[in-house]
Image (cartoon, helix red, strand yellow):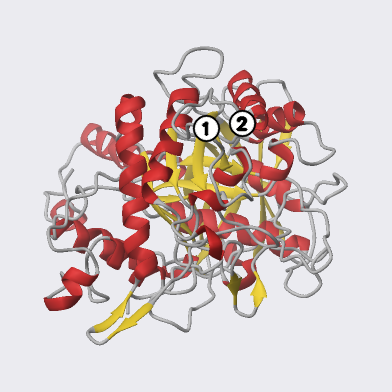
């Protein structure tokens, strides 16, 4: 269509018919613009991210809550997958003996002494509800699986770590045999009734923390060696080899890392991939001391991280005071790790980020670190908006469904969507139907959200009301993309001073409503440092 300048240059003898055609064209453009505002905008964002629930206490049957009901609720809330730790010590016989039981074969899932009962039930309940399964093979280790069993249990920071648990120098070869047993029981090639349920594996938990892999550092005349990273590399590789052989279809779906957000996770990831803290190959004696003389490419399926803020509190806008942490606002640091390690040939290219553990503690019950119940709901939605905008993030997660029971002197997180006795927190609704309003200007607002568990595109209605109170009015009627997400812009007088709420009708005819969202600042990663 000609521009307005061109139209002004036309002869005044333009016919009425041409004017009418022009006016219809202008109207069509205006209508298309309005439609574009109402369509979900997903360019540059992750249109599909796996949503993972982890609650080992409830889903493994360690609480009074019913496992099957909890799994059904996970499906109702719109989770795609459930994750659990497969505790090496927890399933193994005589796990506090410094000698492996005679005749026991760690690579045979049917070897007498193995106890898989909790995981069999977990797998069955997940499968019955159509949920994918992520198994994280994790510590603690049986004493006999340490390279120095006499050091089990060991001391960390002046106290005996986690009672009688052991994390001291786990034997990578034995860990590989344990991974073989898991793959033979639950992998794609395993027989019924347990086989074929696992969709993804991850290996170890938070290896950058001394509580889960010890010792961490060793000083030598030639520099400090991150021995935890070196050992983690060996643990991961031995377990991956077993999974690749005995669960071949999932060999490219084995995650690497599972690092905590604090305690130098970036340095640990680099060292585990034979790179120094600047992401460059080790040189000189350190190359040998780190076991990196002839480093091989690790065929990782992605890097798994737990991007909590300190003590699982704060907000999505919270800055980190260090340059090598991976709290949520600084997760873009992992982009640089992925790029550098791929360019160095340490991992395959185009691997994604999997957030496998995440949440916000609440008060109640945690009066020391918890945020308010309303703040948890808001922060969960805002963090998901942050991760959604990152096309490298392939999975997001929620830890837990229920708060953990209070245990004296125990360091437990209370990040659930329900209180320990079962009452729903506001975050329960906020997770099922997230909504974030972003202030773009006085009269412009972006609305982002999702409808769960939508099956294909879902129609969502959004209303607005004055913050001072008053009648709500419909301001948008949009359709989600096929994965249940939408992103629209609303342009109207005083849009930034309104309160917004989204509603949709699920397949059962229930009208579901989001939390009330007020426009806030743009949500984005902190600049790289």
Residue sitting at x 55%, y 19%: 194
Residue sitting at x 54%, y 33%: 80
Q: Is residue 500 left or right of residue 69?
A: left
Q: Position of residue 335 (x, y in %)?
A: 30, 61
Image mark for residue 104:
1
Which quadrant would the N terminus be assigned to in this image? top left
Is the Cβ of the residue at disc 2 closer than 8 Å to that at disc 1? yes
How far is disc 2 from disc 1 in space, using C-alphas? 7 Å
Does residue 33 show up?
A: no
Q: Is residue 217 left or right of residue 51?
A: left
For disc 2, the neighbor class at 10 Å (few under 14, some 14 to 19, many from 20) is some
Which of the marked residues, 2 or 1, is nearer the chain's N terminus? 1
Q: Position of residue 473 (x, y in %)?
A: 69, 48
Residue that badge 2 annotates: 113
Secondary structure of the residue carrying tag 2 is loop
Q: Quadrant of residue 339?
A: bottom left
Determine whether 93 is above or below 524 in the image: above
Which of these two is toward me, 103 or 27? 103
Q: Is residue 160 left or right of residue 2?
A: right
Q: Position of residue 45 (x, y in %)?
A: 37, 49
Q: Quadrant of residue 62?
A: top right
Q: Position of residue 351 (x, y in %)?
A: 28, 48
């Amino acid at each position: 269509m000609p521009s307005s300048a061109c139209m002004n240059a036309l002869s005044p003898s333009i016919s009425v018919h041409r004017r009418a055609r022009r006016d219809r064209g202008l109207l069509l453009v205006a209508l298309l613009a309005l439609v574009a505002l109402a369509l979900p905008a997903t360019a540059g964002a992750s249109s599909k991210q796996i949503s993972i629930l982890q609650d080992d206490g409830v889903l493994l049957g360690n609480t009074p809550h019913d496992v099957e009901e909890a799994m059904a609720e996970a499906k109702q809330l719109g989770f795609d997958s459930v994750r659990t730790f497969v505790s090496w010590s927890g399933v193994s016989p005589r796990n506090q003996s410094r000698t492996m039981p005679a005749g026991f074969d760690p690579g045979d899932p049917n070897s007498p002494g193995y106890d898989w009962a909790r995981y069999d039930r977990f797998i069955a309940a997940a499968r019955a509800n159509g949920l994918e399964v992520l198994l994280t093979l994790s510590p603690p280790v049986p004493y006999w699986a340490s390279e120095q069993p006499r050091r089990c249990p060991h001391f960390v920071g002046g106290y005996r770590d986690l009672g009688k648990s052991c994390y001291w120098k786990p034997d990578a070869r034995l860990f590989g045999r344990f991974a073989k047993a898991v793959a033979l029981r639950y992998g794609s090639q395993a027989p019924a009734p347990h086989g074929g349920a696992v969709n993804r594996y991850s290996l170890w938990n938070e290896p950058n923390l001394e509580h889960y892999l010890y010792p961490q550092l060793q000083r030598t005349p030639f520099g400090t060696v991150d021995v935890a990273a070196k050992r983690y590399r060996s643990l991961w590789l031995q377990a991956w080899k077993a999974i690749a052989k005995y669960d071949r279809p999932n060999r490219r779906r084995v995650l690497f890392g599972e690092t905590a957000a604090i305690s130098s996770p970036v340095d640990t990831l680099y060292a585990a991939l034979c790179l120094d803290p600047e992401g460059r190959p080790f040189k000189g004696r350190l190359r040998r001391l780190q076991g990196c003389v002839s480093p091989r490419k690790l065929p990782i399926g992605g890097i798994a991280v737990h991007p909590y803020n300190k003590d699982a509190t704060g907000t999505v806008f919270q800055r980190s005071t260090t340059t090598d942490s991976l709290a949520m606002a600084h997760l873009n640091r992992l982009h640089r790790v992925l790029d550098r390690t791929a360019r160095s040939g340490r991992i395959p290219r185009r691997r994604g980020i999997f957030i496998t553990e995440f949440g916000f503690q609440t008060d109640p019950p945690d009066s020391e670190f918890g945020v308010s119940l309303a703040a948890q709901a808001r922060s969960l939605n805002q963090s998901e908006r942050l991760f959604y905008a990152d096309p490298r993030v392939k999975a997001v997660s929620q830890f837990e469904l229920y708060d953990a029971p209070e245990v004296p002197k125990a360091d437990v997180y209370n990040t659930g969507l329900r209180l320990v006795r079962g009452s729903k927190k506001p975050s329960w609704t906020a997770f099922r139907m997230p909504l974030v309003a972003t202030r773009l200007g006085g009269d412009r607002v972006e609305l982002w959200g999702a409808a769960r568990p939508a099956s294909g595109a879902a129609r969502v209605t959004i209303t607005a009301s004055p913050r001072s109170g008053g009648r709500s009015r419909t301001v948008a009627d949009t359709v989600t993309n096929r994965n249940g997400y939408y992103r629209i812009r609303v342009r109207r007088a005083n849009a930034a001073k309104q309160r917004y709420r989204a509603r949709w009708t699920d397949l059962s005819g229930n009208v579901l409503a989001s939390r009330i969202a007020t426009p806030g600042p743009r949500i984005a990663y902190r600049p790289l440092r």
